Amino acid sequence: MYNLSMNKISPFIWFVDKAEEAADFYVNLFPGSRIVTTVKSPKATEEVTSRPTGSVMTIDLELSGSQFTFMNGGVSEGFNLPNGSVSFTITCENQEEVDKYWDAFSDGGKPIACGWIQDKFGVTWQVVPRVLQEYLKSDDPELVERVVACFMKMVKYDIAELEKAAKG
């Protein structure tokens, strides 16, 4: 495992068998990302996991500076993850960035609502423009009401529409 001193708490995601594919996908999608270490399954895991010796067991990676561990855990009772009960938020600076992530996750994924989308690996993301976060923190309750009414109708966020709603 990599040095956990950077983050005291970091996500660990159980995949049935696509940890390596998912890690490659995310590392290529998010700028400043890299695979840190890959741990292969030792012989001792074969009986419990049915994973062959030498196959990928865990992958430690950094995605835009955040540490993650992915594991090929196989099928196991009670571990039907990932699912939408846990999601990761991507704060986007502009529509181009929203579109980039949305398009990448849409390929084989499933759009949900209000900026939420599940990718082809079953991981749920929230693709959120920074400006929306700022509008929601406004001291103007009418502005917040207009923006919320606008975004509740959206699947993928449209910054121009959010700005129009904010202006009234």
Image: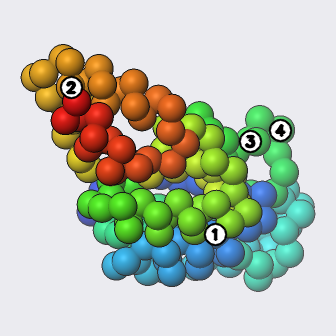
Mark 4–mark 1 Cα distance, whole angstroms, equals: 22 Å
Mark 3–mark 1 Cα distance, whole angstroms, equals: 18 Å
Determine whether label 4 and label 3 are within 8 Å by CB. yes
Q: Which residue is mark 3?
A: 79
Q: Nearer the viewer, mark 4 or mark 1?
A: 1
Residue placed most toward the observer, 150 or 134: 150
Q: Nearer the viewer, mark 3 or mark 2?
A: 2
Relative to 33, is 111 above or below? above
State the quadrant of the C terminus. top left
Query: Helix, strand or loop at disc 2?
Result: helix
Q: Nearer the viewer, mark 4 or mark 2?
A: 2
Q: Residue 159 in the image: x percent, y percent?
A: 34, 50
Query: Helix, strand or loop at disc 1?
Result: helix
- Residue 31's tag is none
Q: Is residue 126 visible?
A: no
Q: Which residue is mark 1?
A: 22
Q: Residue 122 in the image: x percent, y percent?
A: 69, 52
| Badge 3: residue crowd in 10 Å (few <14, some 14–19, many ≥20) | few
**Which residue is situated farthest in the top direction here?**
141
Mark 3–mark 2 Cα distance, whole angstroms, equals: 42 Å
Mark 4–mark 3 Cα distance, whole angstroms, equals: 6 Å
| Badge 2: residue crowd in 10 Å (few <14, some 14–19, many ≥20) | some
Q: Which residue is mark 4?
A: 77
Residue placed most toward the observer, 68 or 117: 117
Instruction: Identify the mark nearer the N-term, 1 or 2.
Output: 1
Q: Which residue is mark 2?
A: 143
Q: Amino acid at mark 3?
A: Phe
Q: Amino acid at mark 4?
A: Glu
Q: Nearer the viewer, mark 3 or mark 1?
A: 1
Mark 4–mark 2 Cα distance, whole angstroms, equals: 47 Å
Q: Residue at x 29, y 20 (%)?
A: 145
